[in-house]
Amino acid sequence: MSRVAVEVAGLSKRFVLHHERYRSFQDLAIHMFRRRRTSEEFWALRDVSFTVEQGRSFGIIGENGSGKSTLLKIIAGILRPTSGSIHVDGRLAALLELGAGFHPDLSGRENIFLNAAVLGFTRDEIEQRLDAIVEFAEIERFIDTPLKHYSSGMQIRLGFAVAINSDPDVLITDEVLSVGDEVFQRKCMDRIDDLMRRGKTIIFVSHSLDQVRYVCTDAIWLDHGRVRAAGRSPEVVQAYLDFANKKDRERRGETEPDEVTAAAGVDASRRWGSRELEITRVEMLDDRGLHSTVFETGSSVTIRIHYLAHERVARPVFGLAIHYGEHVHLNGPNTGAAGLPIEYVDGPGVVEYRIKALPLLRGLYTLSVAAYDEHGLHAYDHHDRLYPFHVQQLRIREAYGMVWMDAEWCHEPGWRAPSSNGHKAPVGVGGER
Amino acid sequence: MGLWRYRELVRNFVVRDLKARYKNSVLGFLWSLANPLLMMIVFTVVAVAVWHRDYRDFPVFFLSGLLAWNWCAGSVVGGTYSITGNAHLIKKVAFPRELLPLSLVLSNGVNFTLAVVPFLLLAAAFGFWPHPLLLLLPVVMLVQVLFLTGVALFLGCLNVYFRDTEQIVDTMMLAWFVLTPIFYSVEDLTQQYARWIYYLNPMASIISTYRLIFYYHSPPDAFFMLRMTVQALLVFVVGYLFFLRRAADFGEEV
């Protein structure tokens, strides 16, 4: 089904820190007489293995100095691994710096050629993409102006335009997505989404955990050069957040809370409620009953809400909502509207929402879950758009919009509408208005 | 070969070098001729006053060696800095690192070619009409590209590990200039010195050949050409191998 785009096996990288480096012949001469070398080894990566499948977006998270950038540089071919192997299937473009090799005295056009050539493109390939690059960067009027007269925003847009239009099979980026204004960022995200739709693979490092949660299907968490967690990105981010929070509490000398909730560490503005009835965990299960955050259009999905009622709560209503991205509200079913009365809850329990055939097309969606009182006025616990998930389309080829309807097309040749007496042609076949 | 894919990058590096040098202007190009012209005047004055040379003949004699020397000096000094001076690129982008010294040699070669045209006009003005031997020019230039690329690769790589290379190269250039037959001819030397200079300094052979083409208008000896080519090839291969063995580590060493 899915092919492997990048395979990293047993990768290790050792840096040797020379405290006294022989950077000059003078040093060398002096140290000829003192034989002992004071150097120290430092393992930036230790036995890192993972695979990224085609069409996935893969995030690398971790604290500063955890080896993220080293890993990217090794995959990009800038650094040589001490041991281990990397296999990349297809053309790889590494975008570790926007506008690498830009020259201030050259015009925008000349810089496009220079920058694209650094990325390994031939003249023909660059010419084919020139218009798209210029348009994407929104610099049509200034294309023949020397780069030194560009604003920094324009330079960044140009750099990103070249990279994203290079149309690689595997795109590697390092934080660079967090540049530009809101509008441009959204444009970049759209383009990345588009790359993924076309089965391209994206690997990126980010300090923005939200970005990783929303953009990446999979992730790994590096801790001091070792893989601490790997898997679906929301789970990896969650594990990392739990760890970071725990560390934070230890630093402040606090004790663990008695209940580690699903939303621990998440922005408080995304979760509210009085919490007599608490939603402790939310699981999404695919048609095989396995945890996942990537689902197939038309397949069955189960959303399982684990709750814990700290006291007896009468007639609660459980509900959920699905958004396309974060802003387009698609639905909002709840147990009240569905006619599932819950007399009371006390202690732990589970509520499930079973979707027989997922009617969503490819894209990134977010799930909200909530528990309210019977009138829907008082929130016990509301998790607002905390659970991102991806929908992929392997079987269904529909490409427009965001909804898939379980319907079929029919065609009857030779069928003619009885003329002009109020009958209508079948919808969508054309005919009369 | 993987390098062929990157021909566009080589072209761009060369264009970048040339544009930066000429600052996008015709005047910029004319300025690049000012240095050899001034050197020619100064050396002609000295040659006429000290060695009693003929002023109608010395400028062409001198320039036929100096232009090729400038190509050499620009490539060797520039090549030494070509890796360390592009650290920002090397740390951020993966591309064959040998393209940096190579494009530097090539851009200096373009510069040489552009200077040859006004030089031929000047030579004609002094009565040295272009000779059919000019057809040999591309061959000698190719030999020079090989030699200079080998040297630039070696020094560029060495400078990553020993920054003193820069200083040493800067200092040695003047000595190399004097030890190369530019303002004198190898024939002026006694036989045994002449032989040593050809063996130890490939630029001496190369410049002597240019001078045969531009000034003496007499064909070079085939064995001499062969020895010169083999010598240049050897320098190229040694320099390239030395470079390739270390190039993969530049990302962390620069």
Image (cartoon, coloured by chain):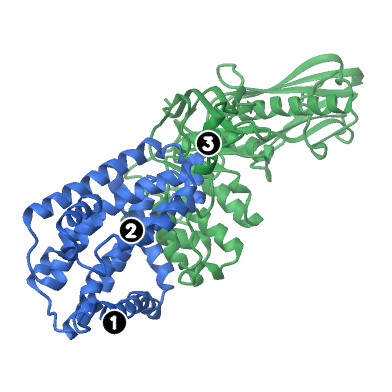
Look at 53% across and 27% down and name the residue there: A13
Above or below, A192 relative to A354: below
Report in which chain the residue with disc 2 lies.
B
Q: Which residue is mark 1?
A: B49
Asked whether disc 2 touches disc 3, contact meaning CB atoms under 8 Å apart, the reply is no
Would you say B149 lies left or right of A24 here? left
Question: Which colour denotes chain A?
Answer: green
Quarter assignment of residue B137: bottom left
Parent chain of label 3: A
- In the rendered structure, which amino acid carries the disc numbered 3? Leu
Residue B39 appears at what percent x and percent y? 34, 75
Question: In the depicted view, which residue is nearer to us: A361 or B175?
Answer: B175
- Secondary structure found at label 2: helix
Chain identifier of the blue chain: B
Label annotation for residue B176: 2
Disc 2 to disc 3, how far (Cα)?
44 Å
Kind of element beneath mark 1: helix
Q: Which of the two discs, 3 and 1, sits closer to the camera?
A: 1
Up the image or down, A149 lies above or below A124; here it is: below
- Residue at the image position 38 percent from the left and 52 percent from the top: B100
Q: Amino acid at mark 1?
A: Ala
State how many labels appear.
Answer: 3
Residue B208 x %, y %: 18, 63
Percent across and percent down for residue B190 are 17, 60
Residue indicated by mark 3: A72
- At x 50% / y 72%, what residue is drawn? A141
Real-space Cα separation, disc 3 to disc 1, in angstroms: 65 Å
Residue B158 visible in the shown view: yes
Q: Are marks 3 and 1 in contact (CB under 8 Å)?
A: no
Q: Position of residue A56 (x, y in %)?
A: 51, 33
User: How many C-alpha atoms fall within 10 Å of the one at disc 1: few (<14), some, or many (≥20)?
Assistant: few
Depth-wise, is mark 2 or mark 3 nearer the camera?
2
